Amino acid sequence: MALLLDTARCVGCGLCVRACAYGALEKTGNGIAIDHEKCVLCASCVQSCPKNALSIERNGSAKADEAAGVWVFAERADALLPVALELTGRARQLADKRGAYVTALLPCGTREDADALIAAGADRIISCPSTYLQTRLDAPYTDWIAGLAKEQKPEILLFGATGFGRSLAPRVAARLGAGLTADCTGLDIDPETGLLLQTRPAFGGNLMATIMSPHHRPQMATVRPGVMPAPVPDASRRGIVEQSPGPDSAGLVELLERQAKKAQSGIAQADIIISAGRGIGPRKNLSLVQQLADRLGAQVGVTRPLVDMGWMGREHQIGQTGTAVAPRLLIAFGVSGAIQHLAGMGGAQTVVAVNTDPDAAIFSAADYRVVADAEEVLQALLQKLG
């Protein structure tokens, strides 16, 4: 990659020199000189130039007019992960707006996996049964996905923000010279430009930022499990399944042993969640939340402040920095509704919110709103349930 200067457009205004924090640009007569040893490709100068005379050449990335199609990495871990279907459903909606096809990359998958992805919205499955992909190591997966993307040039490439996806996606992006937006809570298509609108919380969750990649392809994003709703499968859909050559090595890492953690039921898979925020009052009221959860066969979730205060472990935290959930029912007591928390509960089908503040942000995401004291409502519900 390198910083390029179009001398025909440059007017020597010097705005780029002032924008560079690394001293990589110097005004020389009527032009600009670039010190490539100092340049870190931060793009500050590119954004400052009023004549669009500066640009960054990214090796491996496709140009916008060369790319087409929406791709999804369909991650497996002994079985197809739910986030693969969630992303495929959203990819279908994006592709429809672009008049494009949806391709799912399915490593070491079964015919049942392929059928599930097609029913969720995929038009094409690229499968690879390579033994090197059975190890779930970054290097062979990067070789496989980046090789396919360089050859076929997708417009959009989506990954689940799982532990493996968070490690793999940036490696693929670096190999392709593309940008990557992590932990998106919203994906859409700009109706005027056709660009992928990638929305995620920013500045500590105090606002939502929408990020675009106007020049290089693919446009890449990761989405946390549970953020996008699972699509309703359409068994009547038809698609094609292709086999692709796999990577020719496992890279420099050798997998000696895999130790599986004991599976635990938690809020990510819960059908019903009772959540609590600082508005529940003193810590003793958390026992009321737990009692209600026990009566309803539910899991307890909390906001980040309660975790920071040590009231519950981080495995109970709902939000962008905790766990994204998609329960059938979520009842929130004393939750104000910070942006990051709302992003994590966006997959809930029905939300009931209890808060003393009628203007609390949580009410904007609630189907049923109760303006009342959380402790009083908890006591009343427990008494009613017996």
Image (cartoon, rainbow, N blue to C red):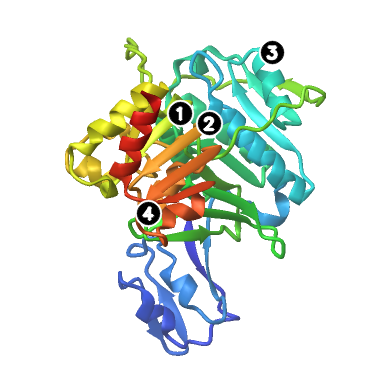
- Say the numbered circle drawn on residue 328: 2
Viewed as shown, does residue 191 lie left or right of 279? right
Q: Are marks 3 and 1 in contact (CB under 8 Å)?
A: no
Which residue has dot 4 on it? Answer: 338
Crowd rating for badge 3 (residues with CA inside 10 Å; few <14, some 14–19, many 20+)? few
Quadrant in which residue 290 is drawn: top left
Crowd rating for badge 1 (residues with CA inside 10 Å; few <14, some 14–19, many 20+)? many
Where's residue 122, x and y in %? 72, 31
Q: CA distance from mark 3 to mark 1?
A: 32 Å
Residue at left offset 39%, top offset 44%: 320
Q: CA distance from mark 2 to mark 3?
A: 29 Å
* SS category of the residue bearing label 1: strand
Q: Are marks 2 and 3 in contact (CB under 8 Å)?
A: no
Compared to residue 381, the image places residue 127 above or below, namely above
Viewed as shown, does residue 372 lie left or right of 208? left
Query: Which mark's residue is nearer the viewer, 4 or 2?
Result: 2
Q: Are marks 1 and 2 in contact (CB under 8 Å)?
A: yes
* SS category of the residue bearing label 2: loop
Residue at left offset 27%, top offset 34%: 314
**Three-letter amino acid code at the position of disc 4:** Ala
Which residue has dot 1 on it? Answer: 272
Query: Which mark's residue is nearer the viewer, 4 or 1?
Result: 1
